[in-house]
Each structure stands twice: as structure tokens, then as C-alpha cells.
Image: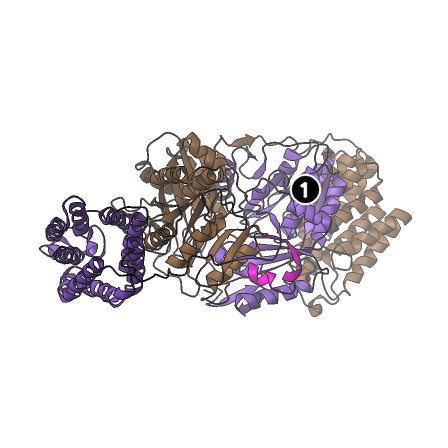
Chain colours: A brown, B purple
Amino acid sequence: MAHFIDTRASLINDALEGLVAASGGRLARLSGDPGIRVVLRAKIDPAKVAVVSGGGSGHEPAHAGFVGLGMLSAAVCGDVFASPSVDAVLAGILAVTGPAGCLLVVKNYAGDRLNFGLAAERARALGHKVETVMVSDDIALPKSKQPRGIAGTLFVHKVAGHAAEAGAPLENVAALARRAAASAKSLGIAVSTCTIPGAPRSARLGEGQAELGLGIHGEPGVERITLPPASDLARMMADRLSGTVAGDRFALIVNNLGSASALEMQILTRAVLATELGKRVHLLIGPAPLMTALDMHGASLSIRPLDDDLEAALTEPVPLPAWPGAIRVVPPVCRPLPDGLTEETFTPSHDAVTAGRIAAVAHALIAVEERLNALDAKVGDGDAGTTFAGAARAVLADLDRLPQADAPALSRALAERIGRAVGGSSGVLGSIFFAAAAAALAEGAAWPGALDQGVARVQSYGGAKLGDRTLLDALVPGIEALKSRGLVAAAQAARAGAEATARMDRAGAGRSSYLAAADLAGVQDPGAVGVAEAFAALAGS
Amino acid sequence: MAHFIDTRASLINDALEGLVAASGGRLARLSGDPGIRVVLRAKIDPAKVAVVSGGGSGHEPAHAGFVGLGMLSAAVCGDVFASPSVDAVLAGILAVTGPAGCLLVVKNYAGDRLNFGLAAERARALGHKVETVMVSDDIALPKSKQPRGIAGTLFVHKVAGHAAEAGAPLENVAALARRAAASAKSLGIAVSTCTIPGAPRSARLGEGQAELGLGIHGEPGVERITLPPASDLARMMADRLSGTVAGDRFALIVNNLGSASALEMQILTRAVLATELGKRVHLLIGPAPLMTALDMHGASLSIRPLDDDLEAALTEPVPLPAWPGAIRVVPPVCRPLPDGLTEETFTPSHDAVTAGRIAAVAHALIAVEERLNALDAKVGDGDAGTTFAGAARAVLADLDRLPQADAPALSRALAERIGRAVGGSSGVLGSIFFAAAAAALAEGAAWPGALDQGVARVQSYGGAKLGDRTLLDALVPGIEALKSRGLVAAAQAARAGAEATARMDRAGAGRSSYLAAADLAGVQDPGAVGVAEAFAALAGS
């Protein structure tokens, strides 16, 4: 697969430049050695403990995305999935560490342990106060002596950053961070591996398969399973996590490993909260991408017993777009459906002129059904006549129940009947036409002006304009003539408009827009002809 | 591919429940009809204009993720890539609209135009003030009469939401929204299609191919291209966008279409800002997933001329995790590498006893090179002797240049020499040992206590414990004896410790941990033997 990169070699440096460029001056980076990739806050307060983390890249937003007030002071970034060098870590420490000292938050991988460890020793030898906390929250291999550090690291970043920002001394910041790390437990699931820019995706996962207990570097999962429904998956993962933690109040991180869709993450969050463990979750972070594995289609859950200190640290807002905040879980809020959704009930009334006109139009449209279908067979899908006739039959069948003597109500009733009788776009457009006319009538407009309003809305929502070879080419001149010269003139204008469509060599909207000029030549638009017939019937009735 | 869902039919409803559950009571949803999927603010202020948007699902966080103070009042969600029904939109309008009226923000697709349009007419017929703004920012097809609405919609959401929150009347909110929509221009690029839950991924894109000018519903792009490097791609896209906008100050949205990795998005952002158009970008939103197409590996750029009103609207913070904020672009901040990275320069000094001990240890380790390699060939990779001897030769060669008379400096120098001479984990662990010892010596410890510190750090960073069948099994008892009983006792203890490793049937760390008990039986750990030889040399020297 192709990737949005310049070169594989400059990948991480380019990305960090982009991150700093998009930070609005909030972040800075160390320059001078392309092998040393450190992102740090633009403003450092040496009176406060510095919190430094990092590791291989490919886990974004971790770690550089969490550099900022209240979280990390600096992030030291290795190449993709490779630990940064001792020199790079030392540079990160030295760039942000003042008299208050520095806490290193290290995910438990051999390379990170050693490189961060030696950097810490060198910084100490230079006279700096440095403490280190290892994060090893992965429970995928229960008997592992060296559990991996994954998304539970975010608990540690937030707690340490909060304590440091509050001015706590290094010993306290380190103690809080170690406490956060000690009881954080995480488990991952994925349905795809990740793609490393410049390398092909591993195809080890078949259709419908998933890996449970995976790492964040593309290493295979502990178990390969057939992916169950989200609710079953959530129960399975929650059960395993439950066995590793004690307590009745928890903080939960729902982490997107990269390319699970937001829909899926929301579904998984709902499913986790519905488990026995989930019901004990009082504080929720996510769903959000926090500790990813490039574009891995997967997710991880991290859980930690909650206490007041942790809650205060996790809920404190920080000005970092990558941190989604921690919310207190409350029962979901539901509202009933609003009134007004039920269709209006119309009070029938009688008006001889109106009834006659409606009947005349309806009979005329039924009479031209076959002719319009034949026209439409040439320039559309052949059902224009049936559509008009269907609407006409529905209105005719309901004629005695219509509020004939109440123009606004009549127009609303026509909107409703036509919308119900005619499916798809045509029905909606017909409804829009009469509903808009009804609103104008209710505001005191006469029929011609009200129909004008209907046309305006049909144009706005339907997207067609005059000359686009649609029914508007008969309807617009018809109404225009109606306003000043009466029904007979309107019928003539509509007829002329319909005939003119036969000379339009390009349809600008509707199904005819897919046809070539030669196919359209000499054929009137069936919708326009239908409108002309309706006007003719009105003029003659 | 498998997806984290329960059932295809309940997909969107489940996801919206998850969104509301993760909102901490900030959001609510309408219940009562599973076909009506509306997310709304839990608290509605009827004195302010309501801003309602929506459309097909699959574009998360749009639109439900942008419901909140300062942006949308409600989002009406259809099924995946399908417009919501008229009833659903009407329900959304009625649920949040008070006397101040409602603005509908509609992306320009036929289904959305019609369903939102008719809902607007029905709401008006019920006496509500409703205005509509169409967004059609996609420039993929320059001659299209109906450009699609894509990520430029976010400009409109933010501007309308800001004006509504400020208490502007409906006419003004609508006018500002129309102005924002009118000059927003967007263009997309993707290297994969999206995967619709329950359906296979379209394989129409080959290795290295990309689609330019794509939509957000999996519809094919306007052009299929070989993906160029990110900088060339950014120039190509910026050029096309430049041709559609005028001005010298722009706001830019960098939108992740779903599963482009954060690294790639940062690289693309850097590349776009470096273009001629990018240099005129004063306000940046993203990179972030704002208007996605499920898990499509792609990105889009949206640009709009900037003025003070727009800047005020876009930069106003809102309490929505999905909104990444708008930052003012400033020159990237770089800091020079800190002092302290360069290796220490040591002042040579002479101390006969120290020199003698170092030489004795070094010669002893060189003498057992073959023996240790032979042991390691049985339980490791056969180079333990060469590793020890290599470090010994490097130190011996430098003996006269070492600060023999300055214990802390000597230990720092040994850390540096050993780290340089020995690659990989062994070199780093050796460096950690002597660097930690140096720090303790500098604080006044004697050598035995200092070596204790070294052991503690090696254990902490290396992850091995006593009994894990490593050199610690000789080193720890050796140092323990040294502290109370002197060098001869230390040598005896180290020897006994090394011999004991032959009886340990499981290695807890290091390369031997991959071997079975039968392979280890009777073989001493070569590292432990090396340590025992070093102590023996010290005792005898």
C-alpha cells in the first residue's frame, strides 16, 4: 500500500516537523542532529519536575502528542517501532530538566529499558535528579516476567504530568506515577496488522479472524480467534481484565489502535460499559486513538482502580488536542420523540370549484399515463406517467376527505398524500412543492404566489434550474403567466415551455442528465408535458 | 474483514448509544423509534438559534461528534452512507428548535437535500422558523452543477454554532453560514477504499495507486494516479485548490478520512504548509479525523479565505473532544541540542593499585575468552567470551589515559569505554553498571556500595533478578561478600554463585530463557563465570 510520506528515511523527522508546525508555537523540537528526535514544550518551567517519555515511533499520538502543559515535558522518538538512542533520550532529559529533576516514563521493552536507563544514569552523573518508572500493563501473557507497556501508560503520563504541574517534588511525582503504573492492566484486540510505511501489510489474518492479546508493534497476538460480536468480545476482554484488578470503582481507557472506525469504537465502548466490569467504571477516557500501532484495525482496553487522587489527576483538563478528556460515566440521557411528527389530521370541507379543478387535473394526468411513460422510455426510466397518474389516483381517491375550503390545509394535505403515494425523489419533491405553497398560503399569499414559493423550494432542494430539461421548464413559465394573465395564458405558457424541452440538448439534472444530446433531440421532457397537461386541465375545467 | 459490531442492523443505533454513554451526560438521544437516530445536546437553550446537521452515517465524528455547546444542537444520522428520513430530520428539528428558530446545515447530496428540505418545509408548516444552508465544497469535478459537500462543512458548523451561541438571530446565523459555505473548497486523496461493516473492501486500488478527488462514500475518485511523495502530492492538491479561491489569508482544514496514520497526516500537514498556498494559511484545523469515510486510508484538504469574523468563530474553544481547535500558524520553534551530550573528557591520572587491578581483571577476561564462548555456545549465541574480552581489550588499551586516581571519574570513564567497545544490550548494561556506580562514588560511597548501586540499576533496566541464571548470580553474592569480608571472600562467593547457575533449570532473562531445562543442565552461565574470573583476578592481584 502507498503511504503519504516523502521518504522512508525522513519519515519520523518530517512527521515531527508537521506536529510542531501544527501546534501553533506550543511545541518545539531539538534541531542539530537528525538522529535525535525530541519534541518538547516551547516553554519549560525549570521549577517543576520534568516528565519525559518516548520510545519507538508509530504509536501516535503517543508520545509526542502528549507533550504539553499538564502531561509530558518532552517526548523522545525513535524510528518506527525502534527505541531511541541513549544520546537522544539524554538530549530530551537535558533539554527540559531543571533543579526540580526529571521523571522518565518508560514502556517495558528491552530496548527502551536500556536506552532510557543509561540516559538516566548519564544524566545523574551530570548532576541531575532523575527517577524512572516502568509501565508493564499488558496482561496478554499472564505468566510473562516482562509484560509489555501499552495504552495503560496514559494513566501514568496523566498522573505524573498533573502532579508535576501542581509543583510536587520529584519523589512524590515518581511515587504517584509508580502507583499508577503498578495497577494499570490492558488487553488488545485487532482484526488487521499494521502497515509500516514502505513495507507490505502482513496477511496473516484471514477473513473474520482477530488476534487477542496483541502488542503495538505488529507482533502476533497471543491467541487467534474468530471475531465474536462486539458484546461477546467486550465480555471476554472484561473478564480477563477483571481477574487482574480488585476494586469497585475503575477508570477505563478505550483506545483505538489506529484504523478501527469511530462507529466501531463507539459500539465497543457501549459493549464494555455494559459488562460487569464496565458497570464499575466511573471514569472513562476515550474512545480515542491514544497508543496506536500505525493503522492497525484494533482496540485496547486499559483499566485501573480509581481513587480520589487518580480521579483528580485524570479529570483535570489539559490543552492537548490528543487528550480526549476523562468523563464521569452517568446513565445515558434519552428524550422522547417530539410532538409534531404525527401527520396532521385534516377536517374535510367542500368547495365545488376546488374539487372540480383537482378532479380535472387528476383525470388529465391519468389520461396521459401511457404517453408520458413512452416519452420517459426514451429519455429516462419509463415510469414518469405512472408516477404522475399514481399521485393523481391517490388524490382522487381521497377527494372527499380533503379540506377543500381551507387553502393552506388543502396544500398541506396534498403534500402529505403525494409524498405517501409516490416513492423516491419525485414524491419528496412533490411534497416539498405543496408544503412550501401551504406555508405561503398560511401567511396570506394567493395561489399563484404560493406556487411560486413551491417552485423556489423545489429548485433549492432538487437542485434543478430553468433550462435543465425538467418539469420546471413548464412549471415556471406557467406560474409566471398565471400570476399576471390567468389560467388560459398559463396553460399556453406551460405548453410552450414543455415543447421547448425537446430542443434542449443537455439535461442539467435528473436521470436524463446521463444521456447524450442525440438521444434527447426532439423528445419533450415527460415531467414538463405532465405539468402542461395539468395546466390545460385547470384552464379547461 | 471482521468489524467490531454486534449486528449490521443495529450498527448505527449501537454506536450512537456508545457516543452518548461516553459523553458524561453532555449528549442525549431521542428514543422511541429505532429508525429515528438523533443525537442532541442534553441541555437546549430555546432562546438561541438551533443548528442541526446530519446525513448518512460513516463519517464520524461528523456529525454527532460535533453536537455540543458552540457547534451543533443536534445531528440526524442515517444508516451508513444513506440519508436520514424526513421524519428523522423533522424529529431532530423539533427536538431542539425554540422561538429563535433553526438552521439546517446540509451537505449537497440529492437524498440529503430532499429529506432535509421536506423536513424543513414541514417544520415551517408547524410554525417554526427554519433556514437551510447547502455545503458543496468539493472541487473534484470543476464543471459539476452539484458539487458534493465534504469536510469544508466543518467551517460551516463552527461558524454557525459560534454565531448561534453568541445569540445572533436566525437571519444572521444563516447569512454567516452561507458565506462560510460559499467560499469553502475541498479536495480529497486516498490510497484505499473504505470497508463498510459487513461488506468486503473494494479492491479497485492496486499497490501504490491513489484516487484523487474522491467522495466520502466509497465512490471512485475522479482520477487514479500513482501516489507521488507527500510533498509533490501536497503541491498538486494545493495548486488545484488555489485556482478556486482568492485571498492572501486562509483557514485550512487537514482532514483524516479515517485510517491514514497520524504520522502520515503530520507529514502531509508539513508538506501542505510548505506550498505557496500553505504559506498563506494563517489558521490551521487539524490534522484530525473530522469528516471521514469509515476506515478509508486517505485525507482531504479544505481551504477558505480568512477574515476576522471567521477567525474569531474558528478559534473560539468548544468543549468537544472531536474538535481539534484552530491554531494560528507561527514559524516552527527549534531549540539547539543541550550541552552535556558530548562525552566527558577525562584527565588521566596514575594510581598503581587501581591500574594493577584493572589490568589483572582485563587479562583474566581475555584469558577465558574461548572458555566462555564454548559455554555460551551451549546456552546462548556463543559470543559471551568475545564480548567480555572485547571490553577488556578496550579498557587495557586505554589504561594510561584513564583517571585512575579519581574513582568517580574512573567509573564514568569505564562506562563510556565499555559502552563504546561493546554493542547491543551487553554494552548498554555494562555502561549502566559503571555509570550508576560512578554516581554513588561521586556522592561519597566506597567501591562496594557503589557497585551495589550499579547492580540495582542493572537489575532495574535489564529486568533480570537473582536466580535468573545470569551474571547477577555471581555478581550479587560477590559484592555482598566484598562489603563485609573483603576480596578473597568475594571471589569465593562469586565462584560459588557461578557454579550454582549450572543447577538452575530455567533462565528467567537473557537469551538462555528460550532454552529448555535439559539443554541448560550442568552448564554454568558464561556471564556468571566471567564475573567470577574477574573477582578471582581482583583477589589475586
**Residue A478 as seen in the image, left or right of residue B106:** right
Q: Is residue B204 magenta?
A: no
Looking at the rendered image, the quarter that the N terminus of chain A falls into is bottom left
Which chain letter matches label 1? B
Tag 1 residue: B162
- Residue A145 coordinates in the image, percent (x, y): 25, 47
Q: Name the foreground residue: A78 vs B482.
A: B482
From what the image shows, is residue B1 above or below residue B318? Answer: below
Q: Is residue A427 visible?
A: no
* Element marked by disc 1: helix
User: Three-letter amino acid code at disc 1?
Assistant: His
Q: Which residues are magenta?
A: B269-285
**Residue B20 as seen in the image, left or right of residue A535:** left
From what the image shows, is residue A307 above or below residue A17? Answer: above
- Residue B106 coordinates in the image, percent (x, y): 66, 48
Q: Quadrant of residue B130?
A: top right
